[in-house]
Amino acid sequence: MKQTTKLPTRLEEGKHFYIEHGNYVFTAYYLELRGYCCGSKCRHCPYQHENVNRDN
């Protein structure tokens, strides 16, 4: 897992995430800053879910 950019210390709603039905949803902008696919099936994954276990 490679992080290409330093993540912000404070996340801004609307820029880094939004809340939908009580769940935090990360934006593609934030996920791209993170620098890798975490494998959690994030809705806005800019890495085509490359680390998602396809068996589940």
Image (cartoon, rainbow, N blue to C red):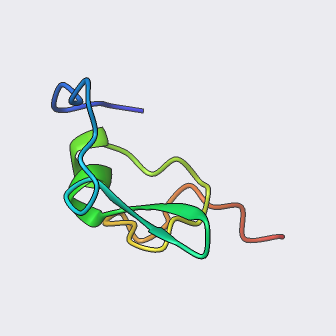
Q: Is residue 29 above or below residue 21?
A: above
Q: Is residue 19 above or below residue 30?
A: below
| Quadrant that contains the C terminus | bottom right
Q: Nearer the viewer, residue 34 or 53?
A: 34
Residue at image position (37%, 45%) is 36
| Residue 14: x %, y % from top left | 24, 63
| Residue 22: x %, y % from top left | 61, 66
Tag count in the figure?
Answer: 0
| Residue 17: x %, y % from top left | 34, 58
Residue at image position (24%, 30%) is 7
Image quarter of residue 13: bottom left
Residue at image position (49%, 66%) is 49
Q: Left or right: where does residue 9 sit relative to residue 53?
A: left
| Quadrant that contains the N terminus | top left
Residue sitting farthest toward the right:
56
| Residue 51: x %, y % from top left | 56, 55
Q: Left or right: where does residue 37 sit relative to residue 54?
A: left
Q: Left or right: where does residue 8 sit relative to residue 2?
A: left
Q: Left or right: where does residue 5 sit relative to residue 52?
A: left
Q: Nearer the viewer, residue 13 or 3?
A: 13
